[in-house]
Amino acid sequence: MKRIFLLAALVLLLQPLRADEGMWLPVLISQRIGDMQAKGFKLSAEDIYSVNQASLKDAVVLFGGGCTGEVVSDEGLLLTNHHCGYGYIQRHSSVEHDYLKDGFWAMDRKSELPNRGLTVSFLERMEDVTAEALKGYDKSMTESMRDSVVRANSARLIQNAVKEGKGLRASVEALYYGNQYFLFVYKIYRDVRLVGAPPSSIGKFGGDTDNWMWPRHTGDFSIFRIYAGKDNEPADYSEDNVPFRPRKSFKISRKGAQPGDFTFVYGCPGSTKEYVVSDDVRYVAEVSDPQKIDLRTQRLDIMKKYMAQDQAVRIQYSSKAAGVSNAWKKWQGEAKGIQKMNTVASKQAFEAKFRQWAKGTEYDGLVDKLSALYEKRNPYYHAYEIYSESIRPIELLQFAGNVRAALSAKRPIDGTVESFFKDYYQPIDEEICAAMLKAFDASMEDGFKPAYFKEKMAQYGSAEAWQKDLFSKSLFTDKAKVLALTPDDIDKVTSDPAYELSDAFNEWYIETLRPVISETGEQIRLLNRDYMRAQMEFEPNKAFYPDANLTLRVAYGHVQGYKPSDAVEYAPVSTLKGIIEKDNPDIFDYNIPQVLRDIYAEGGHENQPVCFLATNHTSGGNSGSPVINSDGNLIGINFDRVWEGTMSDIVFDPDVCRNISIDIRYLLFVVDKIGHAGYLFNEMNFAD
Ligand code: ARG
Ligand code: ASP
């Protein structure tokens, strides 16, 4: 009895450092349920995760390979983001049916569109297998022996796990840098069909202008349905498949999100690093992010200049520019947030205390060893990052490499060639090529530059002259010439200046950079395992959540606005009124469908909620995650964070780290009033 009290007291003590920080493992949620309930949650740990009964986890999926989705009907209806379904919606689109532009609504089951390659993964169970994974390991072994032991044991665990049922996939994941291993068993459904998507002017409203921003008014949702064989088990696409019957689906709440309301995001954050040393954070904030931002600014400026001049170019490059600008904006918030939080200094202060504590223990000297490794790694890693963000993105070079690979493998090249030229505007690539050669020259230390690069720069005298000659001589700018290539023409390809340049850099990377990067990376990974364990011993009363690795997590918090800067304060809920305020037919990102203007003009919709902010600790991969209220019902779909808080992947600031969700009532509004697909409501379960 006494022990139980002690344990309970301990659990209460185990608070994370900052309120609402953390992405917790569902299987261990009993350790946090007390705190969740104290903050308003009315359900139990078993309701969140259970292997004995249906629980909320059975209604959450990993959507594709990098988003989250949730089941909202007994017939497999699934919600995720528009930006998660984007690629699939695009593949079904053509000039005749432009579903990206006009939206898509299947008016009956037969019209739902299959998506080759799209899967959703349900977590069957997760389980601590640390002892099994380390079976046969003893401390006298080297690290590489330990790795082989873990690998062999994991392979066996996985093999046994997938035998348990149909369509299973299993993996053993290292948590806390390999201090713990967990087995994850997923059931993978592979017939997932598109049911509905709003027009992009709603689903992507605000575009890259509003991306990572508040106030936000994006209707970022799309609707799919999971199909199964007649036995309800995973099956390849077939007309005979039937809607999947889930163990659990979310009930929808129309109560909405009021400031202060409890919120809980259940999904799959991709990658965070909260426990690394100050040297790692300093590199990110002071070297890596600023460098990458600068190189991307240059590329984006060039793209935007040409996109503004020509509608066709805008269409060709909008998705490319979106890809470049997403991380570009995120890094700006990350670097700024780390500076503002003084994370490097506070980590250094922590490390000073830690060093004292570690004296005479097995952790003595650990932080210094890590520092030394970063010092060795960073110049090489920096060179690699400059290369990745300058030379590598030059489209012509990538194209030359792809064609060469296809020819060597004796694969047909027509598809590659057609899709390249469909969205290629040579003046953009030329200008980017010259700018990036110049930027590489300026940002890279001389000792690091590839010999090939130095020779060419000496030969031509300037980046522009080199670029001009390259584009005038390369056969890859000429579609007909490329299409005429056969596997016998490999020599023509390898002596082409575009291929030569990309190959010289690739070789330089493999020979000069990669050996140091992988060796130091490996050692850092191993020392981080000790450092993680040491931090847990150093602060035994702190609750540590494992860094994200695309496994299912629980993040809980509450609806709240924030103050981004002096004298500015953001309210947490946006409305349709704000969409009308932003509406502008002349600005692509803000040009709403006429029908939405007409509906608004009818009156009575000013206060229609659209998006809301909350304090949930989320990351990339949490897009599409269900946002759940204190009753366990669905009130929204997570899709973004505010840029001022994107350092939450490294350090969480409760003052400004906010996730952004679409209010489920806006989804219902759009389905009904824009899609006229209100029939979908018949299969949804409404809690209130
Ligand atoms: N920032 C969000 C995320 O990281 C949304 C990205 C898609 N939207 C866009 N406008 N590019 O995925
Ligand atoms: N937009 C991100 C995603 O696609 C979510 C985030 O980074 O907050 O997962």
Image (cartoon, helix red, strand yellow):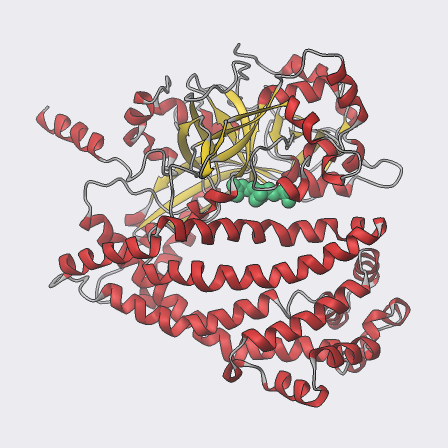
Residue 621 visible here:
no
Residue 560 vertical position relative to residue 603 in the rendered view, above or below: below
- Relative depth, front residue between 656 and 531: 656
Single out the residue that lies furthest toward the front. Answer: 567
Quadrant of the rendered image containing residue 459? bottom right
* Left/right of residue 230 with respect to residue 543 in the rendered view: right
- Which residue: 17% across, 64% down? 364
- Is residue 457 in view from this perspective? yes
- The count of marks equals 0
* Residue 438 place in picture, x, y as percent: 65, 75
Q: Position of residue 445 (x, y in %)?
A: 51, 79
Q: Is residue 393 left or right of residue 359?
A: right
Check the image and name the residue furthest to the left.
Answer: 2
- Residue 360 % position (x, y): 11, 63
Please, is residue 104 above or below residue 373 in the view? above
Question: Ligand 2, what quadrant?
Answer: top right
Percent position of residue 579, x then y: 67, 27
Foreground of the two, 327 or 580: 580
Is residue 383 positioned above or below 83 on the image? below
Q: Is residue 15 above or below residue 415?
A: above
Q: Residue at x 75, y 71 (%)?
A: 400
Residue at coordinates 10% horizontally, 23% vertically from top-left? 1
Q: Left of 671 or right of it: where is 337?
A: left
Q: Residue at x 80, y 32 (%)?
A: 102
Relative to residue 1, is residue 158 drawn left or right? Answer: right
